[in-house]
Image (spheres, helix red, strand yellow):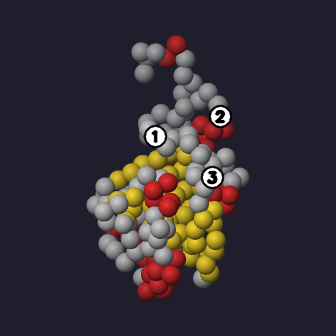
């Protein structure tokens, strides 16, 4: 069973953001688009490259009204320590959520139980709290924030334009499709 179009399950978590610890829940997501980016652990190798890449694109997400969150099974205290010691993570200007109990990782089905770590899972959540995009990678494969931004734009476009769909490699402003009997076998 897929998580697509399901509601984000209830959660309570603490994040490190802008020099403070903040409390978050599923209610924090309501009314705006959100991206949850799960990663295995702080103080690792691929993770800081992904989080730094996402930090570079965060202003683009903000222009779209999209909140970005990084999540690992570390504590919010570990997130602060990593932020204070890593040049890449110092660039992160979005909340880093601590998930030491694994509740969020299990809710989003990315928990590696035998390791206590999360897979690289990316989720786009609409303002109603429904998961619209999900992608899960093996932990050795890093993600690209520019591709995530394209997917967020496509998800928002489809939500704002019922009956239209975005084809492969769609970019903002490009032609979309309106599925109909006339298109069958012509693409």
N-terminal of the pair, mark 1 or mark 3, is 1
N-terminal of the pair, mark 2 or mark 3, is 3
Position of residue 3 relative to residue 110, above or below, is above
N-terminal of the pair, mark 1 or mark 2, is 1
Comparing 77 with 114, the one in front is 114
Q: Secondary structure at mark 3?
A: strand
Q: CA distance from mark 1 to mark 2?
A: 24 Å
Position of residue 185 relative to residue 104, above or below, is above
Image spot of residue 127 (x, y percent) = 66, 49
Q: Secondary structure at mark 2?
A: loop
Residue at 54 percent of width and 22 percent of height: 179
> The C terminus appears in which quarter of the rendering?
top left
Q: Nearer the viewer, mark 2 or mark 3?
A: 3
Q: Which mark is residue 33?
A: 3
Q: Is residue 63 left or right of residue 106?
A: right
Q: Secondary structure at mark 1?
A: loop
Which residue is labeled 1 in the image?
2
Comparing 18 with 15, the one in front is 15
Q: Are marks 1 and 2 in contact (CB under 8 Å)?
A: no
Q: CA distance from mark 1 to mark 3?
A: 20 Å
Which residue is labeled 2 in the image?
161
Dot 1, crowdedness within 10 Å: few (<14), some or many (≥20)? few
Dot 2, crowdedness within 10 Å: few (<14), some or many (≥20)? few
Image spot of residue 176 (x, y percent) = 55, 32
Image spot of residue 41 (x, y percent) = 38, 71
> The N terminus appears in which quarter of the rendering?
top left
Residue at 60 percent of width and 65 percent of height: 12
Q: Is residue 23 visible?
A: yes
Residue at 56 percent of width and 42 percent of height: 6
């Amino acid at each position: 069973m897929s998580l697509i179009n399901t509601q984000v399950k209830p959660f309570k978590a603490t994040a490190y953001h802008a020099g403070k610890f903040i409390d978050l829940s599923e209610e924090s997501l309501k009314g705006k688009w959100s991206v949850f980016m799960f990663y295995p652990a702080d103080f690792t190798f691929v993770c800081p490259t992904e989080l730094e890449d996402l930090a570079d694109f965060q202003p683009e997400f903000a222009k779209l009204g999209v909140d970005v969150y990084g999540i690992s099974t570390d504590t919010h205290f570990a997130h602060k320590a990593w932020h204070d010691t890593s040049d890449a993570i110092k660039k992160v200007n979005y909340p880093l959520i601590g998930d030491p109990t694994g509740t969020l990782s299990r809710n989003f089905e990315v928990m590696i139980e035998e390791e206590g770590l999360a897979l690289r899972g990316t989720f786009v959540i609409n303002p109603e709290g429904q998961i619209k995009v999900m992608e899960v990678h093996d932990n050795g494969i890093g993600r690209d924030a520019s591709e995530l931004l394209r997917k967020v734009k496509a998800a928002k476009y489809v939500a704002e334009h019922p009956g239209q769909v975005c084809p492969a490699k769609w970019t903002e402003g490009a032609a979309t499709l309106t599925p109909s009997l006339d298109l069958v076998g012509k693409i």
